[in-house]
């Protein structure tokens, strides 16, 4: 009976050995599998971390930047923003031409040590250029001048204080008349000299005559006309012809008879007066 039992024990041992071998094989396979997975993961991480070292040059300053080689041009702009404070929307990034935002640095073939040129101004820089101190002061002064009539301003007061010219043409307050067939004369210009205005309709010109010379100005070149009644003498106006693109080119005439003001504006700025 004992002899019959031994084979069973041997079989049991054999089964255990087979199971042990199978388990060992299973562990070995699992170990091999784990190693392969780990290698694949490490490979992915290495690719993600592949970087290039760049030299960013902006506004005469140089910056060192390390960035993944698979970053796009748009991502590079964000990194430049972090370095310089220059918003991406205001950047022009140059590398062998304008750098495209949708391509990666690898596709553009940017390599280690590449120099990236950046052009652009910060918002503060733009504001500082467009609104220098002198401009701000001029705007404040202009705003102050608007608060008082033109005839009270110092630059005009020195002419008006000379009084009404003796040979000025008669004026009619509240009336509107066509331009006379003779020149408007007896008025003052800004320097206090006598001036006359002749409207040459057939030549489309305004002749501004002084003692020294006569300027023949094409009416189409006159950008605007400003006028205002003279305080205390509302039957006469002071009038400016803007001969250039800015108010600095205004030619001032004083003691213009009020009845001709509208006719002068209509004639010069487009509405012709026929006689």
Image (tube, rainbow, N blue to C red):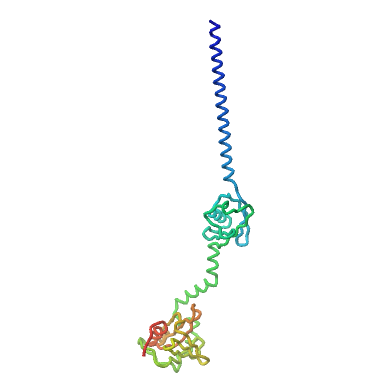
Image spot of residue 151 (x, y percent):
45, 83
Residue farthest top in this picture: 1
Whether residue 69 is visible to the viewer of this picture, yes or no, is yes
- The residue nearer to you, when weighing 131 against 156, is 131
Whether residue 152 is visible to the viewer of this picture, yes or no, is no
Res. 184 image quadrant: bottom left
Q: Which residue does the image show at 56% across and 58% down from the upper left?
A: 99
Up/down of 94 relative to 260, above or below: above
Image spot of residue 127 (x, y percent):
53, 66
Residue farthest bottom in this picture: 167
Res. 172 image quadrant: bottom left
Up/down of 76 relative to 202, above or below: above
Residue farthest left in this picture: 175
Q: Quadrant of the image for the C terminus?
A: bottom left
- The residue nearer to you, when weighing 154 against 45, is 45
The mark tally for this picture is 0
């Amino acid at each position: 009976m004992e002899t019959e039992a031994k084979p069973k024990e041997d079989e049991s041992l054999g089964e255990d050995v087979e199971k042990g071998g199978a388990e060992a094989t299973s562990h070995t396979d699992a170990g091999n599998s784990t190693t392969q997975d780990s290698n694949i993961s490490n490979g992915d991480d290495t690719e993600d971390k592949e970087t290039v070292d760049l030299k960013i040059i902006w506004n005469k300053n140089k910056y060192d930047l390390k960035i993944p080689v698979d970053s796009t041009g748009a991502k590079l702009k964000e990194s430049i923003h972090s370095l310089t404070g220059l918003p991406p929307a205001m950047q022009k990034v140059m590398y062998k031409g304008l750098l495209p935002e949708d391509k990666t640095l690898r596709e553009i073939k940017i390599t280690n040590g590449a120099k990236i040129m950046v052009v652009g101004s910060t918002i503060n820089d733009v504001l500082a250029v467009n609104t220098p101190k002198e401009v701000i002061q001029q705007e404040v002064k202009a705003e102050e001048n608007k608060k008082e009539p033109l005839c009270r301003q110092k630059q005009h007061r020195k002419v008006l204080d000379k009084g009404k010219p003796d040979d000025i043409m008669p004026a009619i307050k509240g009336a509107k008349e066509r331009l006379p067939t003779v020149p408007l004369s007896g008025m003052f210009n800004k320097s206090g000299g006598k001036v006359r205005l002749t409207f040459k309709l057939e030549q489309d010109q305004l002749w501004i005559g002084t003692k020294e010379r006569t300027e023949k100005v094409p009416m189409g070149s006159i950008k605007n006309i400003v006028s205002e009644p003279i305080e205390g003498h509302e039957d006469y106006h002071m009038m400016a012809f803007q001969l250039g693109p800015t108010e600095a080119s205004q030619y001032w005439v004083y003691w213009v008879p009020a009845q001709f003001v509208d006719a002068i504006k209509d004639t010069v700025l487009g509405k012709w007066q026929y006689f």
